[in-house]
Image (tube, rainbow, N blue to C red):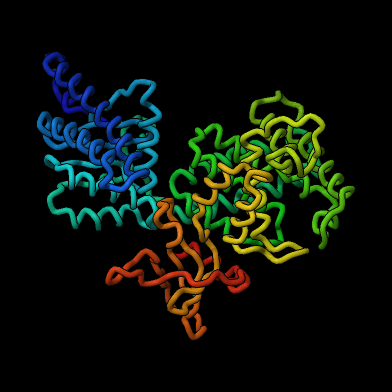
Amino acid sequence: MTSPLDKLTPGAAQDARKTEAPARAHVQALGKNLVSQLFMVLRTVRLHDKRNKSVLVATEHLKDTLNTIIGAVGEVRLEFVEDQVYLSDQRIRVEYTGQENVKELASEFNRRGLGGFTFKRSVTTPSLTELLVAFNDAADQADSAKFMRDRLADLHDLAVELLGRRKFADNKQVVPELKVDPRLLALQTYAKAVIAVKRFVAELVTPPEAGKGGMRLKLVRIVQDLVDLSDERANLLLKLVAIKDSNDYPFNHAVNVCVLSIAIGRAIGLGREDLVDLGMSGMMADLGFAVADSELAEKASALDDQELEKLHESTIAAVRVLLGKGALTRGAMRRLIVAFQHHIHCDLKGGYPQLERPRPLHLFSRIVAICDNYDALTTNRPWREAFSPDEALKILAHGAGSKFDPTLVRIFVNLLGLYPIGTAVILSNGEVGMVYHTTDDPKRFDRPFVRVLRNPDGRPVERTVIRDLAEQSGGQFKYSIVKVIDQSAIDNTARASLFNG
């Protein structure tokens, strides 16, 4: 970004900088306060109702800071470019302890397709509160930016301009960010992940010649892309997980466990590096099944102890290949631990392998265990039909405290909602549909968005119809879920429509 000072002659610019130095320092101090307060108030709005005292107090402080800056420099342009923050084109240099706050704020704006706000005039606490609530609600909308524009149109006493996303070019100038269809990007990344897992397994079975192969590094890069996507549009990835393909189960399962694990990791606040390690651990946890005897892996009945041991040996063999001959990195150690531990029960009293001297399970192992079981339960297998997503969550909840970590199960249920994406349902008006979109708002866990597939008379719908189950009329909800039905009511063609519209 360029400063107005850069347009002056060298001598005039030097004099101007001496004059403006105190003003710049004042803006820096106010900017740091503004960033810190915005971070705190958005986190508070996520946790409490807008009438809560904590929200009111935090918003009041933010309002005072905003109005002070507006009084000093006129309109306030707060913009996030990559992991940096600018106040009226002046970069705010945040101390190390506050850099994570800036990154999270930048991520939240990026997630909504925004770069920041420009406040044209002073604000009041009520109008600022409504803006913050709208910003929070926009995270769960298909078009967050449009949702924000529509809400701002109703706030007549608030003069705020929404800023688009921008990024740094090679010359460090800021340029508008290219528009990328997030749905297409998510589809492409997911498909690349499945293909990469297949090729990686092929390398496990038939090691490539020297100088060829290298799929492990490509997998890491794809997992990094999945982590970035989970930051912007987590619901898109969860929709992909809901589109099941039992024909390529080991490979789709590996990617699904990776995506679900990343989602839990992000929900508990893991950093990007840990999320990549967690995603890789989830992706590789069960690759032993992919290289095992296909008849054993797809047996249409429960495995006996000897067969389970044979599968476990295949997993260990695959892990040895995963480690390779290179340095034993932290990420490699985590993948090894997860592959070994994720079938052991949380209470250490069941599962396999049986341990003579049990030790607490690694956090990643406990996360992957939940995701591994959920994806397996919701996929057709040779010996049983798939459970509905809500049934799978009930099975996980029943095993909380024994098989699964109870805190992580609760987080996972909160993440997916009472009716996870892809659940087949009948609505109170007789329509048949599937859950299309969920929210992390606890008040809406039982009221997701539903895509209508069939009319009450059983005829397929001819156009896209999305029911918002939180919509009310006359103080009553217009639509409700009356029954979850067999998942076979929704074929994969219908499931693919999760990504349309």
State left or right for residue 468 relative to residue 338. left
State left or right for residue 493 relative to residue 318. left
State left or right for residue 298 relative to residue 395. right
65, above or below 409, in the image: above
- Name the residue located 26 percent from the left edge and 40 percent from the top edge: 53
- Residue 99 visible? The answer is yes
The number of numbered badges drawn on the structure is: 0
Which quadrant, please, contains the C terminus? Answer: bottom left
State left or right for residue 260 relative to residue 198. left
Q: Residue furthest bottom?
A: 457
| Position of residue 351 measured from the top left corner of the image (x, y, whole percent) | 76, 44
91, above or below 411, in the image: above
- Residue 195 visible? The answer is no
Which quadrant, please, contains the N terminus? Answer: top left
| Position of residue 169 measured from the top left corner of the image (x, y, whole percent) | 37, 35
Q: Nearer the viewer, residue 215 or 432?
A: 432
- Name the residue located 66 percent from the left edge and 47 percent from the top edge: 196
| Position of residue 114 measured from the top left corner of the image (x, y, whole percent) | 32, 45
| Position of residue 233 measured from the top left corner of the image (x, y, whole percent) | 45, 50
- Name the residue located 37 percent from the left edge and 43 percent from the top edge: 47
